């Protein structure tokens, strides 16, 4: 069981680099921004929309090279050749992207309905360039198991980001006058959120420069480039499909609503309530950072497929536990956003379920990554993207953000089913589907029990919720034998 302990340990360390920053964002910035834009929800809608573009474009600009780097570092004899080849490719494409952004700023701003605020486009371009150049050095830290440095730099990034933002919105008005942070409509502007992000990302990239010491243009190799492209481009297409599922709704609000102000208002409410379920995404991300290198490094072991299945079972139990925690105590969690956003609380259960399915989908992705059949990722995510597009275009104008949440769940559910069916044919992993289904059904049952059992005394009500949460966790711990795995001494090796 040593490998599961090691994976858990790496996940916890990577979690320091993902969960701690995300929690800082959630605990500090979400309450701060939802209150800063309490009576200007449309401006918060811009933040939600523009960061959706960042997520989408990061997939485009890294075009599967992180995963390709993991794959070919373990195949090629020369680490320097792999790093130099991939980093050169990223450097060239990023330079082209920046040229296009700055040359076509006004046209892009007009297309996205940001006339008069074209500076947002330049800020996004700067953030994306720095984050893209940081991607491979961060991947290098992961493949070399330098989880602590990875975590420290991610925490530094967010602490700097928060500090600079607070300076702009709290300190600078006292120095430069209150008009300094206002936009043309004399309302608090969101532009300093993006300026702060760019400054913080640039500082962290400077700290990553030592990780680029392997880079030398003379090690650039066209043969390696061709192979990583063949491997990585399908991941780009599937990644774009995946990010469409995750961000399309936020990108098209302004294009399906006749009234731009109403679209941004709905988007602001949607984005704020989305944050309440984001702890599930945090868990998925911290797991992903540790699990992806683990999947590749453990591939040659005789029991690899059994271990992959075991990881899936444990992962589902943990994410469902986190989701139940959010939903059972939603009346407390809601205070992290301003009361003007409470109308969107009804979508939180749907977003929680969508994130659980997203985590399952990531676990399933091991089959096409290890079998080099990444072309099937295109099929899976294309189907998901089509579902997301269809649901949003048809139902978003009438049902608003609720339709977007339903679209997320439907899309991820269908993708999970397709990926599982294909994995049975090409890379059979012995997942215990009845057990996974049982965990999901038990979590749903507990959620509805809590909804329909009314207890007037607040203390007893919370104790009952806690009992339900403990009941679920105890069941998972027993079924997965987690005490034996993580707390008893291993006699292996």
Image (cartoon, helix red, strand yellow):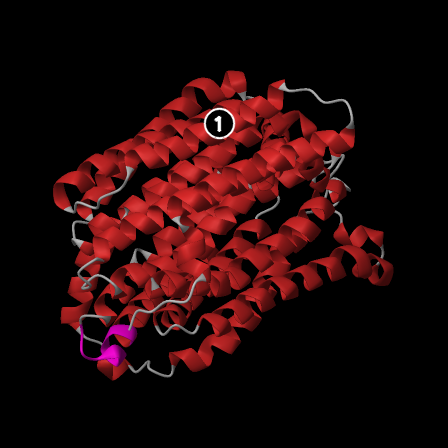
Instruction: Report whether 268 appears left or right of 70.
Output: right
* Residue at x-position 70% and y-position 52%: 28
Name the one closer to the observer, 105 or 480.
480
From this view, report whether residue 310 is shown above or below residue 45: below
Seen as rendered, the residue at the extreme top is 398
Q: Which residues are magenta?
A: 76-83
From this view, report whether residue 97 is shown above or below residue 39: below
Q: Tell me the quarter of the picture where residue 418 sits.
A: top left
What percent of the width, then of the height, locates residue 454? Answer: 69, 20
Is any part of residue 273 visible from this angle? no
- Count how many numbered circles sit on residues in the image: 1
Image quadrant in which the N terminus is located = bottom left
What percent of the width, then of the height, locates residue 441? Answer: 42, 28
Is residue 198 rendered magenta in the image? no
From this view, report whether residue 202 is shown above or below residue 277: below
Instruction: Report whether 207 appears left or right of 331.
Output: left
Disc 1 target residue: 444
Image quadrant in which the C terminus is located = bottom left
Is residue 82 rendered magenta in the image? yes
Q: Main secondary structure of the magenta part?
A: helix
* Residue at x-position 52% and y-position 16%: 398
Instruction: Report whether 326 appears left or right of 403.
Output: right
Q: Tell me the quarter of the picture where residue 453 sits.
A: top right
Name the one closer to the observer, 162 or 27.
27
What percent of the width, then of the height, locates residue 455? Answer: 72, 22
Is any part of residue 280 visible from this angle? yes
Give the SS element for disc 1.
helix
Name the one closer to the observer, 164 or 368.
368
What percent of the width, then of the height, locates residue 77? Answer: 18, 78
């Amino acid at each position: 069981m040593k490998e599961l302990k090691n994976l858990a340990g790496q996940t916890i360390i990577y979690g320091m680099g993902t969960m701690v920053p995300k929690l800082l964002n959630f605990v500090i910035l979400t309450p701060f921004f939802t209150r800063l834009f309490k009576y200007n929800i449309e401006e918060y809608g811009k933040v939600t929309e523009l960061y959706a573009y960042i997520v989408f474009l990061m997939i485009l600009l890294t075009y599967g090279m992180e995963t390709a780097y993991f794959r070919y570092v373990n195949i090629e004899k020369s680490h320097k050749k792999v790093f130099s080849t991939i980093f050169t490719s990223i450097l060239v494409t990023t330079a082209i992207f920046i040229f296009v952004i700055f040359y076509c700023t006004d046209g892009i701003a007009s297309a996205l309905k940001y006339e008069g605020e074209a500076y947002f486009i330049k800020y996004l371009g700067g953030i994306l360039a720095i984050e893209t150049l940081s991607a491979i050095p961060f991947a290098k830290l992961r493949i070399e198991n330098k989880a602590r440095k990875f975590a420290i730099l991610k925490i530094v990034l967010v602490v700097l980001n928060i500090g600079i933002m607070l300076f702009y919105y709290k300190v600078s008005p006292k120095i430069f006058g209150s008009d300094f942070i206002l936009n043309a409509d004399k309302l608090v502007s969101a532009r300093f959120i993006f300026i702060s992000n760019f400054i913080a990302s640039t500082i962290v990239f400077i700290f990553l420069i030592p990780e680029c010491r392997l880079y030398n243009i003379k090690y650039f190799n066209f043969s390696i480039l061709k192979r990583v492209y063949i491997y990585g481009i399908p991941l780009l297409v599937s990644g774009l499909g995946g990010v469409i599922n995750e961000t399309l709704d936020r990108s098209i609000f302004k294009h399906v609503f006749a009234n731009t102000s109403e679209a941004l208002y709905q988007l602001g409410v949607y984005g704020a309530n989305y944050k309440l379920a984001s702890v599930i995404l945090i868990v998925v991300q911290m797991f992903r950072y540790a699990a992806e290198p683990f999947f590749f490094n453990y591939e040659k072991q005789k029991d690899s497929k059994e271990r992959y299945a075991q990881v899936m079972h444990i992962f589902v139990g943990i994410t469902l536990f986190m989701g139940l925690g959010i939903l059972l105590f939603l009346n407390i969690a809601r205070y992290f956003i301003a009361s003007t956003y409470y109308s969107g609380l009804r979508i939180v259960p749907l977003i929680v379920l969508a994130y659980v399915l997203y985590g399952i989908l990531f676990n399933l992705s091991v089959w096409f990554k290890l079998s080099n059949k990444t072309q099937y990722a295109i099929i899976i995510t294309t189907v998901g993207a089509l579902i997301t597009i269809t649901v949003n275009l048809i139902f978003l104008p009438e049902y608003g953000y609720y339709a977007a949440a339903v679209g997320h769940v439907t899309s991820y559910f269908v993708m999970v089913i397709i990926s599982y069916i294909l994995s049975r044919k090409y890379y059979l992993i012995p997942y215990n589907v009845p057990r996974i289904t049982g965990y999901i059904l038990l979590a749903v049952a507990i959620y509805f029990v809590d909804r329909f059992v009314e207890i007037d005394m607040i203390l007893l009500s919370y104790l009952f919720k806690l009992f339900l949460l403990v009941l679920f966790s105890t069941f998972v711990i027993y079924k997965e034998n987690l005490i034996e795995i993580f707390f008893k001494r291993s006699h292996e090796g």
